[in-house]
Amino acid sequence: MTPSEVRQLLADVQAGRLATEEAFAQLSEPAVGDLGFATLDLHRKERCGFPEVILAQGKTAEWVAGAVRRMAEAGQDCFVTRLSDEQAAHLSAHFPQAVQDRLARTLWLPHKPAGPLVGNVLVVTAGTGDLPVAQEAVVTARVMGVNAELIADVGVAGIHRILRHRDRLAAADVVVVVAGMDGALPSVVGGLVDCPVIACPTSIGYGAAFGGVAALLTMLNSCSAGVCVVNIDAGFKAGYVAALTARRVEKARRG
């Protein structure tokens, strides 16, 4: 519970809108949700600004549903990534009010309606095959309260395709560049903008791409100074870091 939420809770008790026992129960919420198969960090939002995110990969559909249910019971926004088709169908039956994006493989179950989006994150893909990872970045940034838009299929094989978007690139607070194959696009974008560029390699590519390792090494060796790199196929991580950065930029704008 944030300081502002504690103040509101005490004000509600003082005004008689909330019983003392109910307030005590809310203040006594444990720091973790122990489910046996998972130990959920229920104080992460207070420390880091966003609740724990559930990675569905490697879990049964029942485990994922149990984690979502516990997060909801604790009054937490719930974001799930890397949902399989089986898991998605199971969660749709149990949480029909949740929003799913099957391209991004995500589920979003907010505790309460979100406020207006802030900032400006631009997610760029080198190819159409990179779209699932890129959409994961877009959805992640949006659920964290940040405007995020997508430009698809503008890789270096046709350099004019990215150059026609220079005005949009220049207006961004952060640019996420998602690319497989040779992974060259982040360096090009990094040479065009004055904001951070987050490079996200994907596992798209032929044999010598080594499942994204070739793109990862290219990005790590970028000659553009403003480029930093996340892991292979890590659209969530790219979107998360981009959103944190854009929120800080928006906070500085507002003074």
Image (tube, rainbow, N blue to C red):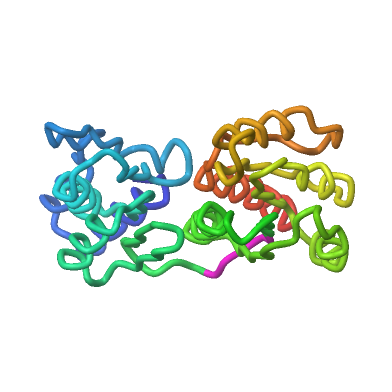
Q: Identify the image quadrant of the N terminus.
A: top left
The residue depicted at 34 percent of the width and 48 percent of the height is 6
Q: Quadrant of residue 54?
A: top left
Q: Quadrant of residue 201?
A: top right
Q: Where 52 sits versus 193, above or below?
A: above
Magenta residues, start to end: 116-120
Q: 76 or 196: nearer the eye?
A: 196
Horizontal relation, residue 30 to residue 169: left or right: left
Q: Position of residue 96 (x, y in %)?
A: 22, 71
Q: Most prominent secondary structure in the magenta stretch? A: strand
The residue depicted at 50 percent of the width and 46 percent of the height is 236
The residue depicted at 22 percent of the width and 57 percent of the height is 86
The residue depicted at 61 percent of the width and 31 percent of the height is 213
Horizontal relation, residue 104 to residue 159: left or right: left
Q: Is residue 98 magenta?
A: no
Q: Position of residue 103 (x, y in %)?
A: 45, 63
Q: Position of residue 60 (x, y in %)?
A: 18, 44
Residue 171 visible, this angle = yes
Q: Quadrant of residue 149?
A: bottom right
Q: Position of residue 214 (x, y in %)?
A: 66, 32
Q: Is residue 119 magenta?
A: yes
Q: 127 or 135: nearer the eye?
A: 127
